[in-house]
Amino acid sequence: MARLPRIDLAGIPQHIVQRGNNRLPCFLDDGDRLRYLHLLHEALRATGCQLHAYVLMDNHVHLLITPPAAGRIGQLMQRPGRNYVALFNGRHGRTGTLWEGRYKACLVDSTDYVLRCYRHIDLSPVRASLTDDPASYRWSSCPANLGQRGHSALTPHPCWLALGNDPTERSNAYRALLDEAYPTNCSPASAFICSSSEPWAMTPSVRWSKPRPAALRASDPRIGHASRAPSIDKLT
């Protein structure tokens, strides 16, 4: 069966998930994580994409990214998608694939859902019982989003900037969002990853409620399937 074309629109953020093959770990140590972040940072600079939130879990990655033009997300994902595999295999004496097929991507076109996606990503370590405080997890955007450290690879989304008039207000407001009761029975997959059977979904399980852009009306595709490591201080 032919692959469905990806919907990739300039200026519309996307929630991206890439998993290890067979749900096996894609990061075995902090050296792996630093190398992945280095490649991601390089790819962001090369493509002009903006990274708003991220988390590196043991066997998968979540990213919230806004592309400046159609096609840039695919270009961005090639660097960590391919180059990281070569680095990982070389470090750990293995061969073959590392990722579970194509990365999954879903458009997020709603102020409410942009912030929910921020929260979903930054709370991933808490849901996985890796920590009780998301700000203590080193390999996510949460410490930066809470103002605890800088991060040169992150670009705040306008929805996040609207949380307050200055960095302190925004960080406090975001902390309040994280502290709100979170629906523990809400599956991450059903909450934020658009199924290939859900056409035109711009927010989780929501179909288009406004006229579709001309670029989308044309074919009516469906969203689906939507060296030495630097120190983390150089990446943050």
Image (spheres, helix red, strand yellow):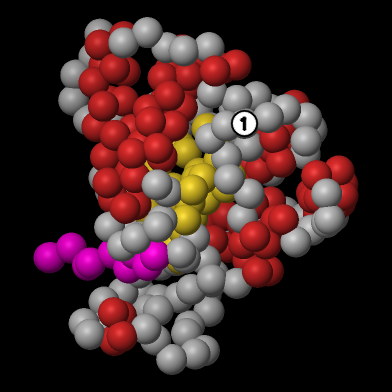
Q: Residue lying furthest left in this view?
A: 1
Give the image location of residue 228, x and y in percent: 37, 8
Left/right placement of residue 160 relative to residue 59 reads right
- Classify 9 as above or below 231: below
Task: Give the amino acid type for the residue marked by disc 1 in the picture.
Answer: His
Quadrant in which the C terminus appears: top right
Which residue is found at the position 44% from the left and 32% from the top? Answer: 41
Give the image location of residue 172, x and y in percent: 87, 46
Mark 1 crowd level (few <14, some 14–19, many ≥20, 10 Å Cα):
some
Give the image location of residue 186, x and y in percent: 65, 59
Left/right placement of residue 228 relative to residue 119 reads left
Which residue is found at the position 31% from the left and 25% from the top? Answer: 84
Which residue is found at the position 31% from the left and 10% from the top? Answer: 227
- Classify 102 as above or below 134: below
Q: Is residue 200 magenta?
A: no
- Classify 118 as above or below 108: above
Residue 129 seen in the current view: no
User: Majority secondary structure of the magenta segment?
Assistant: loop
Residue that mark 1 sits on? 151
Give the magenta part as a residue range: 1-10
Residue 19 occupies which quadrant of the picture? Answer: top left
- Classify 173 as above or below 219: above
Depth order, front residue of 141/187: 141
